[in-house]
Amino acid sequence: MFLTELTASDARFKTLRFGPGLNILLADRSVGSEQGESRNSSGKTSFVKILRYLLGGELPGEFRAAELSEHRFTAELQIPAGRPATTTGRRVTCNATVTRAVSPSTKVRVTNWPGSDSAEELRVDDWRGLLAREVFHIPETVARPTAGQLWAQLLRTYFGNPIKGHQSETDWESGVKLGFMLGLSPEVLGKAGELDRLSKQGKAIRKAVQEGALTHLSLDESALRAQLATARRLRDRVRADLQAFKVDERYAEHQREADQLTGEIRKLNDEGLSLQRRARELDETLRDVLSASEDTELTERLGRVYAEIGLVLPDSVTRRYEEVAAFHESVVRNRKLFLEQELGAVGSRLEAIDHERRALDRQRSQVMHLLSETVALDTFSSAQRDLAQREAEVADIERRLDAAREISTIGDTIKLKTAELVTAVRAETHDQADRLDESIALFNELGAEIYTDREAALLISTSSKGILDIRPSISGDASSGVRSVETFILDIVCVIAAIRAGRAPRILVHDSHLFDAIDGRQVASCLNIGARLAEQHGFQYIVTLNSDFLASVEAQSEGAFDSLPYVLPTRLTDQTDTGGLFGFRFG
């Protein structure tokens, strides 16, 4: 796969066109400008980030600027359309285009991809999967490496460590990624990830238990076994008592009878209280009647008083008064008799209620006595609850003991799996020794070409954890310049090995930051190597450089490197606001 063109929907964007072999994208830097890009001054690094974004990467933070919200980036790629022809050994190619908007960033539009007759709009995850299958030929059964990890190695923006595509990449992921590019089995190397996860889980659980985060778990198996023995003994004792217990079958019947008697007594009590209130009312009414009788005597005394003071009432008046008084006395007498009769009836009923209540109470006492002597059902129920609690306690301790055993055996499992993995990785490196030897020899040759006074070696081994350990090494001081040369050589070696194994596109991109700390003569050697090997192995090597830095490299090389055939016609500059890649400054 070659990159032939990179453009954007904004007309101000500098369209970049690329050819096979070495391509140098130059940027003119104004005098006094600081190293690196500020406010996207020229756009060298942005070019690499745009390419990464188009090939399934995340949107860089600086591209979230409002000025870029309507931008769509497009890359034209030359893609092999089939198997190599038998006569020429060359593949038929087609030009596919990939377009991705800044917003929304969830879709990628792919046109003229091999095997597709029309444009397709793919979700980013589907696009990544397509690249993994058809560009890198990653088996679908493995989780590592991912297409993103391989692009990070081929389109570098991180230079802190030669073997890593980004700072947070783990050692086992780096081993799988580089091993895949060198032709080793990702299925074998990827088992290091399973082992790493198991090891982290074991450490996390142990730490949580030790710090008290999992209070119900303990790693002390001996203490748990002692607790379990005690709990089982108590459970068995309760179970034996329960089996020997005899249940009174009439207990429930007696309890219902007691409840019925209690209800009848309660009804009698309620009736008695009501009759007592009625008796009080009758008694008060009777007293009122007696008071009315006393009022008649008062009337007679009143007549005598009138007589004594000389007043004589007419006979007709006296007679009428006597008739009324006689009638009133008759009414009072009848009322008194009725009240006395009703009061007597209430008293009789109260006596009857008392007799009935006493009889029911004696009967209930007999039943309650039976219940108090045969508390069988309550005892049985309590024993059942106690047994259930003991069973739950035993089950909980058994579960905790099993967990402690599993945690304790994690270490043994890790040791066993580690030994198996170490053996498997060593066997894989032995089986692929010819391929690895080619890469090792090429690394050594390139190191000797760049540094005549140093020894270079690509050290490939299996770590004690079963991780493929790849260490590029150049003797002498471990300066940042030497480390950058190690990165350059490793990337060249890996892309060539991956192309031979059919596991990589034919493209490698290096940002200018890789060469910042390298001496000019070594940079010239690196560029010569890149140009020669790109032509020899048929891949595209794209480099971004500042023009003043390139001029210094050519001067120090004393004619050993001539950049003219490789420099792209489009040049970037930070000397004007419109001279950068985007054609304007933003952010």
Image (spheres, rainbow, N blue to C red):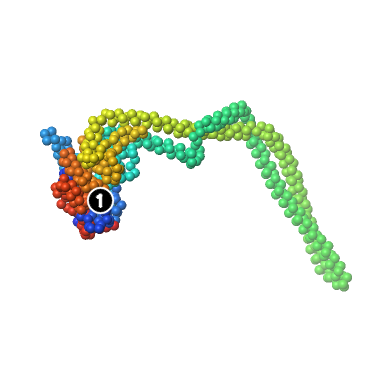
Q: Position of residue 357 (x, y in %)?
A: 72, 41
Q: Say which residue appears at 19% left-offset and 46% top-offset.
A: 524
495 relative to 297, above or below: above
Q: Position of residue 576 (x, y in %)?
A: 21, 59
**Residue 23 appears anywhere in the view:** no
The answer to which image quadrant residue 13 occupies is bottom left
Q: Say which residue appears at 76% left-offset and 50% top-offset.
A: 343
| Residue identified by numbered label 1 | 45
The answer to which image quadrant residue 64 occupies is bottom left
Who is closer to the viewer here, 570 or 14?
570
Spot the residue most to the bottom.
310
241 relative to 504, above or below: above
Q: From the image, which quarter does the C terminus lie in?
A: bottom left
Who is closer to the viewer here, 575 or 82?
575
Who is closer to the viewer here, 72 or 334?
72
Tell me the element at label 1. Answer: helix
The crowd level at tag 1 (other Cα within 10 Å; few <14, some 14-19, many 20+) is: many
